[in-house]
Structure formats: C-alpha cells, structure tokens
Amino acid sequence: MTAAEVGTPHGPARVHLHPTAEPAGWLVLGHGAGGGVGARDIVVATRTANEVGWSVALVEQPYRVAGRKSPAPAPQLDSAWTAVVERLRADVLGDRPLVAGGRSSGARVACRTAAATGAAGVLCLAFPVHPPGRPEKTRLPELDAVAVPVLVIQGERDPFGMPPAAAGRTVVAVPGTHSFTSSAQGVAEAVAGWLPRAG
C-alpha cells in the first residue's frame, strides 16, 4: 500500500493505493463525515475488492488531511473528489473501469459526481437517506440521479433510513445500524457478488 498527497482546489487530499496486478478495474472510496478510510466496512470492501481482482484507492478529503473534524460544504467535497479522480485517471487508472463509492457522506459525494467522474458504478456503504428522525429531509434524489449501476449496503436498523431498491440499484441489508461494524461477512459477500459485474 502506498499513500500520496494530491492537490485539489481546496487543499491537498491524501490517497492510499491498494493495487493488484493487472486489475479488472479500480474502486475509489471516500470516508464518512467524521470518520476516516480506516472504517471497518471500508477496510472489508478494500480487501474484498483486491480478492476479486480490483485495485482500490482510498481518498481522504482535504479537511481531514488538514486535521479538521467538521466536513467541508458539499460543493467543496465534490470538487476535491473530482480533482482526485481526474489525477488517478491520468496516473494509474488508464482505461480501466472506475467504480466510485464511499461510506455515508462519501457515498453521497460519489453519487453526486458519478457522471462527472465517468464512474461505471457506485458503491454506497450506509447511504444516509435522511437525518435521523427527519424523513422529510430526504437525500434520495442524489441516489435516484445516478445513471449507472448502484450497490447500497445498509444496516437493517440504520436511523438514517433504508433506501428502496430500484432499476439499476441493488440494496443489501446487513445486521446493525449506521456503522454495521459486526457485519463484515455481509459486506464482503455483497461487494464480491456485485463488483465484478459493475465494470
């Protein structure tokens, strides 16, 4: 695994590469609002992707690299993410398929930028459909707007809601809440079954 800083319009991001030999494609994952790329489900998804022949890039947003805990506004997150993906395409991805994704806030970023980054698919780990107790504040349009295949892995008791399955969107419920920290096997099985078909 190697790590490197990548310049963005909002300061440097950090990318952790987990390459495989002759990858079928690249999975690029972002972290949640208050967490990092070491979140358990991100680690499981990374290991699983490598096992099925995909390389992985984990992206730390500039606010995290700068040591801030509070996330930047959505437009800054999106533009920083897009800048990182463009750099990855130029440096390592080549013409291989790209699947974008992330945990919670990172999943929202991947959805909002799927078209701009040319993603072949989107992997959402715990997509926050709405703030807890506020179903009227839905973020479902961000998910609905994605025009490529989507896999959502969601805790059965997630207070942020459960998105519905839809055309092109697979939703897999696993035990737990928003963190589903004890659902490693369910996450691994879902990623292993979907990712090879996403590219």
Image (cartoon, grey):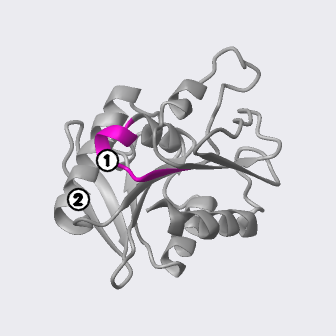
Q: Position of residue 164 (x, y in %)?
A: 71, 36
Amino acid type shown at disc 2: Arg
Asked whether the beta carbons under mark 2 and mark 1 sit within 8 Å of each other, the answer is: yes
Q: Which residue is mark 1?
A: 118
Asked if residue 34 lies left or right of residue 4, the reply is right
Asked if residue 24 lies left or right of residue 42, the reply is left
Q: Position of residue 42 (x, y in %)?
A: 56, 60
Q: Residues within 10 Å of mark 2 (few under 14, many from 20)?
A: some
Q: Which mark is residue 150?
A: none
Q: From the viewer's side, name the closer residue of 168 and 25.
A: 168
Front label number (2 vs 1): 1
Q: From the viewer's side, name the closer residue of 82 and 122.
A: 122
Q: Position of residue 95 (x, y in %)?
A: 24, 65
Quadrant, the C terminus:
bottom left
Q: Is residue 46 above or below residue 78?
A: below
Amino acid type shown at disc 1: Gly
Residue at figure coordinates x 67%, y 25% from the top left: 131
Q: Secondary structure at mark 2?
A: helix
Q: Residues within 10 Å of mark 1 (few under 14, many from 20)?
A: some
Spatial CA span between label 2 and label 1: 10 Å
Residue at figure coordinates x 28%, y 52% from the top left: 85
Q: Is residue 105 visible?
A: yes
Residue at figure coordinates x 19%, y 37% from the top left: 9
Q: Secondary structure at mark 1?
A: loop
Q: Which residue is mark 2?
A: 89
Asked if residue 51 lies left or right of residue 156, the reply is left
Q: Is residue 48 magenta?
A: no
Q: Residue furthest top?
A: 136
Q: Quadrant of residue 188?
A: bottom right
Q: Is residue 30 visible?
A: no
Residue at figure coordinates x 35%, y 62% from the top left: 97
Span highlighted in magenta in the image: 113-123
